[in-house]
Image (cartoon, grey):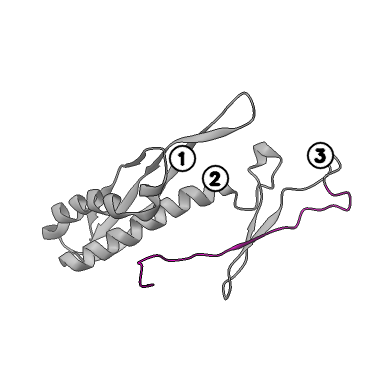
């Protein structure tokens, strides 16, 4: 952490979709690109297929939903550890809704996080369920977006 409490993040986004014609027309290029960060693997990305992208690559909309789910999970696990709640499983089936406008622009209407959490013992169940609200309050990404991020968690006890 810096003295001012500010953190910097840098990624490189490199377009790989030049088919030899550049952007001579809307259909002349691919939307493929790579997301890179120093010392990390490359994320193969594209536009959503509905926007002429490749279905086998992550798109920006998926990565936004993923970043919200990751941030919530990491805060939740931190809080659980601090409270003595032993989490042994966490799986979020996060989903987002984007509305496209007539002019081609659009915006997310909401993202719904649906974490399924497994705790080690029944005594932790109520505490674990309550931690989601605090994780949401602390999540940097959720605090930075203009649309609602809702939580629909479920918690179960390990067998």
Marks 3 and 2 in Cβ contact (< 8 Å): no
Q: Residue furthest front?
A: 4
Between 145 and 83, which is closer to the camera in this rendering? 145
Residue 110 to residue 65: above or below = above
Q: Residue furthest left?
A: 123
List the residue tagged with mark 3: 27
Looking at the rendered structure, the secondary structure element under dot 1 is strand
Marks 3 and 1 in Cβ contact (< 8 Å): no
Q: How many marks?
A: 3
Residue 116 image point, x, y percent = 32, 51
For label 2, count other residues whose C-alpha is less than 10 Å away and answer few (under 14), some (14-19) or many (20+). some
> Position of 48 compared to 112: left or right?
right
Tag 1 or tag 2, which sits nearer the N-term? 2
CA distance for labels 3 and 2? 21 Å
> Position of 147 compared to 151: left or right?
right
Tell me, yes or no, whether the highlighted magenta stretch contains residue 53: no
Residue 31 to residue 106: above or below = below
CA distance for labels 2 and 1? 8 Å
Residue 38 image point, x, y percent = 58, 73
CA distance for labels 3 and 1? 27 Å
Tag 2 or tag 3, which sits nearer the N-term? 3
Q: Which residues are magenta?
A: 1-22
Between 22 and 131, which is closer to the camera in this rendering? 22
Label for residue 61? 2
Image quadrant containing the N terminus: bottom left
Looking at the rendered structure, the secondary structure element under dot 2 is helix
Q: Residue at x 33, y 50 (%)?
A: 115
Residue 19 image point, x, y percent = 85, 52
> Position of 140 compared to 58: left or right?
left
Label for residue 96? 1
């Amino acid at each position: 952490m810096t003295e001012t409490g500010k953190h910097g993040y840098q990624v490189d986004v490199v377009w790989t979709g030049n088919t030899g014609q550049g952007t001579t027309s809307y259909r002349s290029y691919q939307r493929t690109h790579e997301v890179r960060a120093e010392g990390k693997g490359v994320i193969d990305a594209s536009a959503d297929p509905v926007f002429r992208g490749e279905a086998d690559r992550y798109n920006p909309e998926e990565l936004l939903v993923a970043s919200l789910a990751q941030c919530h999970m990491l805060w939740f696990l931190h809080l659980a550890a601090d409270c003595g709640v032993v989490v042994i499983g966490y799986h979020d089936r996060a989903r987002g809704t984007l509305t496209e406008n007539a002019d081609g622009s659009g915006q997310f209407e909401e993202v719904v996080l649906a974490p399924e959490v497994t705790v080690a013992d029944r005594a932790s169940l109520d505490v674990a369920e309550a931690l989601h609200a605090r994780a949401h309050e602390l999540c940097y990404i959720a605090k930075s977006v203009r649309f609602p991020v809702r939580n629909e968690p479920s918690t179960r006890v390990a067998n």
